[in-house]
Image: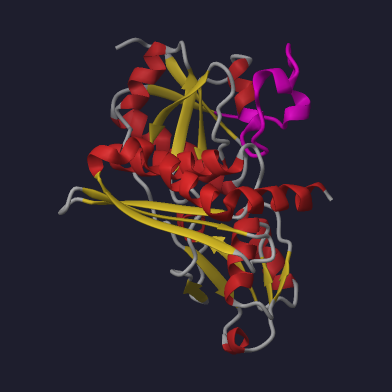
Amino acid sequence: MSKKTIRIGTRDSELALFQAHTVQKQLNDLGYKTEIIAVKSEGDLLLDKPLYELGITGIFTKTLDIAMINGQVDIAVHSMKDVPTALPQGIVQAAVLERATILDILVHKGAISFLDSEATIATGSLRRQAQWWNKYPNHKVVDLRGNVNTRMQKLQENDWDGAVFAAAGLERIKLKPENHINLDWMIPAPAQGAMVVVAMAEDEFTLDALSQLNHIETEICTYIERQFLKTLEGGCTAPIGALAKYNEKEDTIHFKGVLLSIDGKQKLEIEKVVAISEWKKLGFHAAQEILNNGGVQLMEEIKQQLKK
């Protein structure tokens, strides 16, 4: 084995560091040398080309993409739900780790009687906001941004009744409180609960190392969900949920997808069960059905609203 040290790029949030250390341990267990490098914000990085030429769009992934293209790090680890469906030129998906829980949860302050009356719920996600309003149209939803720790702190400091989080993120950094409700009715973000590792397309040594970390079932299910997202959105952020599950006993894939209006009043859903052999086009076909049944018009309305 070559003595090359694989440099793992990470942002310095607690969750990002947890993810980087998870991949580091798995690579070390296989005998590879690794080094974790905390990457500065994108404003500190020099670029030879404008961002739009590189096709970099992801707000959470941009800094690490640039560091990889500039040769400062070899790989980056991301929460897969934050990664744009089209990767920048020269960067490829190298491994998808086995998925954690896909659930969204509501973190509250002890009492949950507010669910049956008026309430203020916090989330920075259009998908969560729309699904919440669809179920609880009388509730108020306020914006909540920042990393997991910051959002938890904001919940405690404000008079909100609760806030919606991905269970996987809170579990990874042991921050999931007892005061929570599993929102099993809420369809998660495409690839929620999965971690993805990206690398440079020409780096054969690193790609070979990472291929050994890939979990095929998670790779297939997240591919279907992200294909559904990509086919629907056409570069526009929208309230979209998707979940694919493999049924080993029947050798089938069970898929659920949803597109909602921003106010949650309109909801277009699809559910399909197909043989595993049909997985490659499942996300595309499911999205086409949504688009053909009112989705085109709904996506246009969402785009117009987001422009305002």
Location of residue 218 in the rendering, given as x and y in whole percent from the top left corner: 34, 43
Looking at the rendered structure, the number of numbered marks drawn on it comes to: 0
Let me know if residue 191 appears in the view.
no
**Residue sitting at the far left:** 249
**Residue sitting at the far right:** 308
Indicate how the structure is coloured in the image. secondary structure
**First to last magenta residue range:** 37-64
The structure residue drawn at horizontal position 49% and vertical position 65%, both measured from the top left corner, is 186
- Residue 82 or residue 260, whichever sits in front: 260
Q: Is 250 in the magenta?
A: no
Picture quadrant of residue 61: top right
Location of residue 196 in the rendering, given as x and y in whole percent from the top left corner: 45, 36
Is 115 on the left or on the right of 216, as rendered?
right
The structure residue drawn at horizontal position 56% and vertical position 21%, both measured from the top left corner, is 73
Q: Is residue 28 above or below residue 107?
A: above
Location of residue 179 in the rendering, given as x and y in whole percent from the top left corner: 52, 77
Picture quadrant of residue 21: top left
The N terminus: image quadrant: top left
Is 225 on the left or on the right of 113, as rendered?
left
The structure residue drawn at horizontal position 36% and vertical position 38%, both measured from the top left corner, is 219
Q: Is 47 in the magenta?
A: yes
The structure residue drawn at horizontal position 34% and vertical position 22%, both measured from the top left corner, is 209
- Residue 260 or residue 185, whichever sits in front: 260
Q: Is residue 92 above or below residue 277?
A: above
Q: Is residue 2 above or below residue 189?
A: above
Is 299 on the left or on the right of 246, as rendered?
right
Let me know if residue 58 appears in the view.
yes
Location of residue 6 in the rendering, given as x and y in whole percent from the top left corner: 45, 20
